């Protein structure tokens, strides 16, 4: 086996320490390491979901939308967790469900020598506007949510108005203004880095410049755009 009787040494000031046994963790840079971690984390999350017994957030789609054709049958479904490597986003309908999930996650991960980073963990409640008796949304009148006070290992989990997941900024008002500002700034930075080496060089043809722009600048601007929900005004800013 790859990890059987594995040992390591640490180099300090040019000198190697005595060898010691490796009892936990994965080999950094090892080809099977990501797969092994995914298998472990998938097993852990399944145990967490089983113990927490919470459903997550319900998603539903209309006829002939992006995901379903006009004749295709579809069903509503629930999403509780989004996973990428060791990053996790949990989505719950209520504070009680969220606390159940976090408590179960902390309990089960510790059984497998995994530690949840409280400093990197945050809670965000989505903005919800009040409705009148006819179901009309009242602009500017937000539903009051109770304060969420969840402590792990005597540390309180921070409540935030926005957070970054996989390079995308998500805000509680569910608007894309903040993310667009970041994307435009990053794209401008990428464009300016090529100012003298590409854009100002007469020896570089327009066709080549266009290919470079599409390869190096446009992907920076449109990163994460697959999940954007933009207004007409916001669309004009990036066109």
Image: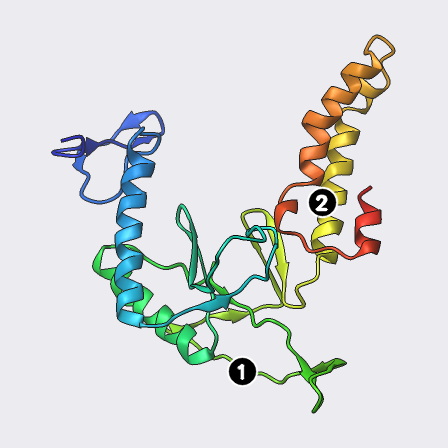
Category of crowding for the residue at label 2, using alpha-carbon neighbours closer than 10 angstroms: few (below 14), some (14–19), many (at least 20): many
Q: How far apart are marks 1 and 2 (CA)?
A: 32 Å
Callout in the foreground (1, 2):
2
* Among numbered discs 1 and 2, the one appearing first in the sequence: 1
Picture layout, residue 233 above or below residue 194: below
How is colour applied across the structure in the image? rainbow
Q: Residue 183 carries which label?
A: 2
Residue 40 lies, in percent from the top left, at 26, 48
Q: Residue 114 carries which label?
A: none
> Could you say which quadrant of the image residue 151 lies in?
bottom left
Q: Nearer the viewer, residue 78 or 35?
A: 78
Residue identifier under label 1: 147
Q: What element carries label 1?
A: loop
- Is the residue under label 2 in contact with that under label 1 (CB below 8 Å)? no
Picture layout, residue 59 above or below residue 16: below
Number of numbered discs overlaid on the protein picture: 2
- Residue occupying image coordinates x 17% and y 33%: 6
Residue 112 lies, in percent from the top left, at 22, 55
Q: Which of 226 and 42 is in front in this view?
A: 226
Q: Is mark 2 on a helix, strand or loop?
A: helix
Left or right: residue 229 compared with residue 201: left
Picture layout, residue 157 above or below residue 176: below
């Amino acid at each position: 086996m790859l990890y059987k009787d594995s040992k390591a040494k640490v180099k300090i000031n040019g000198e190697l320490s005595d060898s010691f046994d490796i009892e936990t963790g994965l080999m950094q840079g090892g080809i099977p390491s990501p797969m092994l971690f995914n298998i472990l984390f998938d097993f852990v999350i399944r145990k967490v979901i089983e113990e927490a017994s919470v459903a997550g957030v319900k998603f539903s789609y209309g006829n002939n939308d992006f995901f379903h054709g006009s004749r295709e049958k579809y069903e509503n479904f629930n999403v509780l967790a989004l996973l990428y490597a060791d990053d996790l986003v949990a989505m719950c309908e209520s504070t009680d469900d969220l606390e159940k999930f976090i408590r179960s996650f902390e309990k089960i991960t510790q059984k497998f020598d995994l530690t949840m980073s409280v400093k990197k963990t945050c809670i965000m409640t989505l903005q919800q506007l009040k409705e009148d008796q006819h179901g009309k949304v009242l602009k500017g009148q937000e539903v009051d949510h109770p304060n969420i006070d969840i402590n792990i290992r005597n540390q309180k989990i921070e409540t935030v108005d926005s957070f970054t997941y996989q390079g995308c900024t998500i805000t509680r008002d569910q608007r894309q203004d903040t993310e667009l500002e970041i994307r435009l700034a990053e794209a401008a930075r990428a464009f300016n880095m090529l100012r003298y080496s590409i854009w100002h060089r007469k020896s570089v043809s327009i066709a080549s410049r266009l290919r470079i722009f599409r390869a190096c600048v446009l992907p920076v601007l449109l990163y994460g755009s697959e999940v954007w929900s933009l207004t007409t005004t916001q669309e004009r800013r990036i066109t």
